[in-house]
């Protein structure tokens, strides 16, 4: 069983908790080490996009050394289970109905409240994964940013402020539960849990991939978390990575 958060490193400010976590792995940190920071000056999204990380949000990374049921293609399950853990933690502290959007977002009423950045690295011969989770908690995001019209925070949804420590503890508990299920071969159950919380399935979506844009109905995910898209001509296409936009 992998214990998450036996070691928690709390910083006031850092460029990116993911980058800090990678340095810790290089220095031989304990698996399951968690890094969080009040502020990130160089927070990252996928594809080198910027992640705004002012005070008030939960910006954290987890150092993992996946084994057993989580090797090879199955590493693709990690961002999905991270999204489930984040959505459950948000719903747990706030009573909001947080849902997951393929591949890596947590949304409330269609608006993004959290994102996941999962990075795989080699440390010597060992495969490690850093999972970065960013949740907009007490920081407003509905004004002032170019993504404001498609984002929200817990405080903007509820009108209240929340204890980041409590959210972190819930997130670690949910993450540990799902991660250990996946490592011990119960990945099908983890994916079922994702399906139960998914806002994407059954919807018409447009996926922006490096190879171009594709539109269809999101029918399901496969055993490694890839999206199964039904195209207009009735064929299906399996999408491993991309940006997903819900069209309805
Ligand atoms: C993500 O990327 O959603 C992954 C975000 C991961 C952030 C965490 S915080 C802790 C750890 N350390 C890091 O440096 N990163 C991780 P992506 O799907 O590419 O979405 C990025 C896009 O979301 C940006 O291009 C903006 O449009 C938008 N965005 C930026 N900051 C945001 C915020 N605080 N809340 C909502 N949307 C944001």
Image (tube, rainbow, N blue to C red):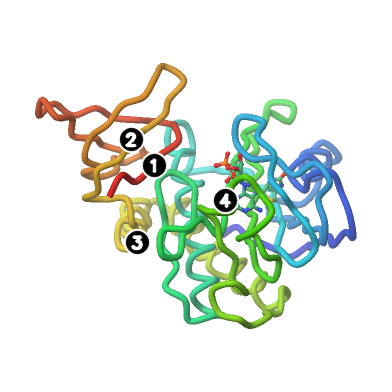
Give coordinates of residue 161: x percent, y percent: 68, 80
Residue at x-position 72% and y-position 49%:
52
Contact check, label 2 and label 1, Cβ < 8 Å: yes
- What is the C-alpha distance between the residues marked 4 and 3? 18 Å
For the N terminus, which image quadrant? bottom right
User: Tag 2, which secondary structure?
Assistant: strand
Cβ(mark 4) to ligand 1 < 8 Å? yes
Query: Camera-side residue: 11 or 188?
Result: 11
Question: Can you identify the residue that label 1 sits on?
Answer: 245
Contact check, label 2 and label 3, Cβ < 8 Å: no
Q: Residue lying farthest front?
A: 144
Neighbor class of circle 2 (other Cα within 10 Å; few <14, some 14-19, many 20+) is some
- What is the C-alpha distance between the residues marked 4 and 1? 14 Å
Give coordinates of residue 216: x percent, y percent: 23, 35
Q: Earlier in the sequence, mark 4 or mark 1?
A: 4
- What is the C-alpha distance between the residues marked 1 and 3? 22 Å
Residue at x-position 37% and y-position 51%:
187
Camera-near label (4 vs 3) is 4
Question: Can you identify the residue that label 4 sits on?
Answer: 115
Question: Can you identify the residue that label 3 sits on?
Answer: 193
Position of 67 with respect to 161 (left or right) is: left
User: Tag 4, which secondary structure?
Assistant: strand
Residue at x-position 83% and y-position 60%:
9
Question: Can you identify the residue that label 2 sits on?
Answer: 206
């Amino acid at each position: 069983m992998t214990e998450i958060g036996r070691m928690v490193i709390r910083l006031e400010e850092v460029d990116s908790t993911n980058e800090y976590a990678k340095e810790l792995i290089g220095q031989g940190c304990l698996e399951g080490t968690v890094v969080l920071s009040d502020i990130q000056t160089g927070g990252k999204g996928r594809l080198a996009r910027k992640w705004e990380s002012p005070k008030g949000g939960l910006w954290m990374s987890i150092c993992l050394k996946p084994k057993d049921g989580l090797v090879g293609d199955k590493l693709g399950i990690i961002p999905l289970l991270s999204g489930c853990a984040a959505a459950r933690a948000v719903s747990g502290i706030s009573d909001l109905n947080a849902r997951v959007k393929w591949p890596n977002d947590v949304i409330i009423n269609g608006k993004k409240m959290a994102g996941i950045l999962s990075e795989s690295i080699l440390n010597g011969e060992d495969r490690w994964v850093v999972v970065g989770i960013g949740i907009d908690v007490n920081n407003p995001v509905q004004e002032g940013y170019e993504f404001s019209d498609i984002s929200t925070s817990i405080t903007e949804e509820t009108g209240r402020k929340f204890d980041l420590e409590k959210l972190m503890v819930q997130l670690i508990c949910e993450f540990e539960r799902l991660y250990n299920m996946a490592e011990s071969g119960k990945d099908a159950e983890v994916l079922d849990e994702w399906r139960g919380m998914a806002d994407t399935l059954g919807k018409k979506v447009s996926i922006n991939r490096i190879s171009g844009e594709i539109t269809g109905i999101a029918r399901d995910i496969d055993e490694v978390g890839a999206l199964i898209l039904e195209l207009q001509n009735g064929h299906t296409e399996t999408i491993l990575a991309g940006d997903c936009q819900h069209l309805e």
